[in-house]
Amino acid sequence: MRTLFDAGYQGLGVQTDGHVTTPPHRRFKKDAPEWDEEMYERQRKAHASRRIRVEHGIEH
């Protein structure tokens, strides 16, 4: 079973043998190329759109 977590749990995926999925890590801290920044944003938004269903379920 795969579980979606927010960025606060990054690194947990390694400890749980890949059962935890977190948003992608930034590869470049400073002066990131434009293509990398766009890819990072697309991946982050895709992860968030999958997680929002869980967040709304918790809210109710």
Image (cartoon, helix red, strand yellow):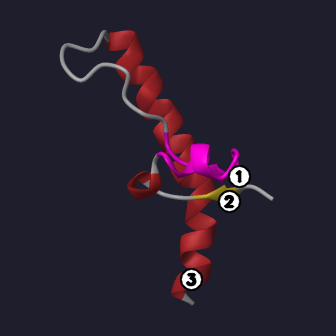
Give, as a three-letter code, the residue at label 3.
Answer: Ile
Q: Earlier in the sequence, mark 1 or mark 3?
A: 1
Q: Is residue 40 above or below residue 47?
A: above
Within-10-Å neighbours for mark 2: few <14, some 14–19, many 20+: few
User: Which residue occupies 27% across, 14% down?
Assistant: 32
The circle drawn on residue 52 is none
User: Which residue lies under the disc numbered 1?
Assistant: 19
Q: CA distance from mark 1 to mark 2?
A: 6 Å
- Left or right relative to 38: residue 18: right
* Front-most of residues 27 and 47: 27
Where residue 26 sits: x, y (%)?
A: 37, 29
Q: Earlier in the sequence, mark 3 or mark 2?
A: 2
Where residue 53 sits: x, y (%)?
A: 63, 68
The circle drawn on residue 3 is 2
Which quadrant is the N terminus positioned in? bottom right
In this figure, what is the number of numbered marks? 3
Q: Earlier in the sequence, mark 1 or mark 2?
A: 2
Q: CA distance from mark 1 to mark 3?
A: 20 Å
